[in-house]
Image (spheres, rainbow, N blue to C red):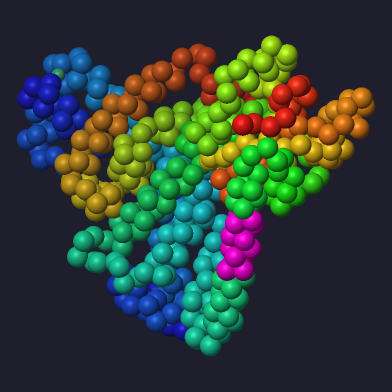
Amino acid sequence: MHNVPFTSDEELLRLLAVGDESAFTALYRQHQPPIYRFALLMSGSAMVAEDVTQEVFLALMRDAHRYDASRGTLGAYLYGIARKQVLRSQSRNHSHVSLSASAADENEEVPTLIAADDPLHDCARREVILRVRQAVLALPAKYREVVVLCDFQELSYAEAASALDCAVGTVCSRLHRGHALLLERLRTLSNADAPWRDVVVRCLT
Amino acid sequence: MNCREFAGIVIDLARNQALDTTQRTQALLHAELCIHCAARLAEERAWLANVRLVAIEINRQEAPTRVEAALLTALRAQRQPEPMRKPYTVNAAWLSWRWAVVAMVLLLMAGLAGIAWRSSNGAAPSQEALRVATPLPVSTPPVFAAQVVATPEPMPARVKRRAPQQREARSSVAPSSETAAPFYSLVEEGQMAPLESGRIVRIEVPAATLVQLGVPLTEATLTQPMQADLLLGQDGLARAIRFVPHTPNTRTPE
Ligand SMILES: [Zn+2]
């Protein structure tokens, strides 16, 4: 086993290719969180996010040689695999596309969402979070992935273009279109009879 | 700067990134003068604030530790030397041999059913076909009756046409009863390949056999030989059966 605290991704991949466990662990711990969050935001399901994360790193383990550093960062490469996995998973199970009450429940396992001192403030925050995530999940996939990468994961346009294997101009135009759809959707969701209010009511009990 | 140019950079302006000082100053000036663009900028800024709220929540989440454990197990398995994988190869060979046997048996059954068809081409009722092809002599509930009733008619090309006068005679005695009688499934759902094409063979069987196959009959008819339509699938296996009301001159199809 090697100690690999400050090794570059390329070096870690080289070690991984010969089966070095600590190299894999280092790569996994560095890149897993953003990949998991990307899949979570894209699918609205913790279960799908977990499956996608596993598939992405299995693919890396199997085909580490496929990564070409000249085409972008390893992070962007892994986002590219994750994106395909999410789309595949959603074509298999279409119900994960929308953030339903059950999908919201799935994320209730996060204890930080339950505020002990100010439940009303917490519910208002939760209301906003649900509205935003619901609006993102309602986007067509090609806009959703750009919004998740550029807005939530804070990738540059060039990094997002590398992850999505498209031109920077395409990323920009999809981001603009995605925002237009999101803002329109959020205006609609602001209506008093929005379905997410059910979830808020349950939060107060 | 006009509204169109402003719309092209409003996201970067809200994020305060990717714009040079001149562009940024011009855009902000435009927003001061244009209510529409000022509102758009405010919306973008509100959106970004919401995104940060979600990001704070999301950034606490990671894949469960079991994922890393499972991946490390997979990595170790991948590193196993070649001899460790040998049993796998043996297993695969045994599996393919088993599949070959299954395929041969199926082919044999289809062939026998085909022979049974040909030999039954005429007045003789194809008891043999029933014996050879019926895989399930159990009283299966008529779960597929609705689907099966609809399927025989779309495949008339392989079903022998009856003479017009025969049809008329029959309909005058038992109007539409023959076509209305439901088929009773002889197989469980998923047990066979979906029905793509088929053939209906008219047979004469003891009433007790029909009862065994799940066709409900009255006590009065139990002692008589009954006519029935047997639906054979594209593989030659019997899929369903229906009771044909006993009427004169309807013994067998032409
Ligand atoms: Zn304007």
B148 and A150: which one is in front? B148
* The quarter of the displayed image where residue A204 is located: top right
On the question of residue B236 being in view, the answer is no
* The quarter of the displayed image where residue A144 is located: top left
B106 and B156: which one is in front? B156
Residue B134 pos. (x, y %): 72, 48
Asked if B110 appears above or below B244 in the picture, the reply is below
Q: Which residue is drawn at 42% across and 52% down?
A: A85
Q: Residue at x 37, y 51 (%)?
A: A84
- The quadrant of the picture showing ligand 1 is top left
Q: Which residue is drawn at 19% across and 65% down?
A: A70
* Quadrant containing the N terminus of chain B in the rendered view: top left
A185 and B80: which one is in front? B80
Residue A66 pos. (x, y %): 30, 68
In the image, the segment drawn in magenta is B99-112
* The quarter of the displayed image where residue B105 is located: bottom right
Asked if B194 appears above or below A138 in the picture, the reply is below
Residue A28 pos. (x, y %): 44, 65
Q: Would residue A142 be found to the left or right of residue A45 on screen?
A: left
Q: Would residue B213 be found to the left or right of residue A122 on screen?
A: right
Which SS does the magenta portion mostly show? helix
Query: Is residue B111 magenta-colored?
Result: yes
Asked if A39 appears above or below B231 in the picture, the reply is below
Q: Residue at x 33, y 54 (%)?
A: A80
Residue A172 pos. (x, y %): 20, 39
Tally the numbered discs: 0
On the question of residue B123 being in view, the answer is yes
Query: Is residue B225 magenta-colored?
Result: no
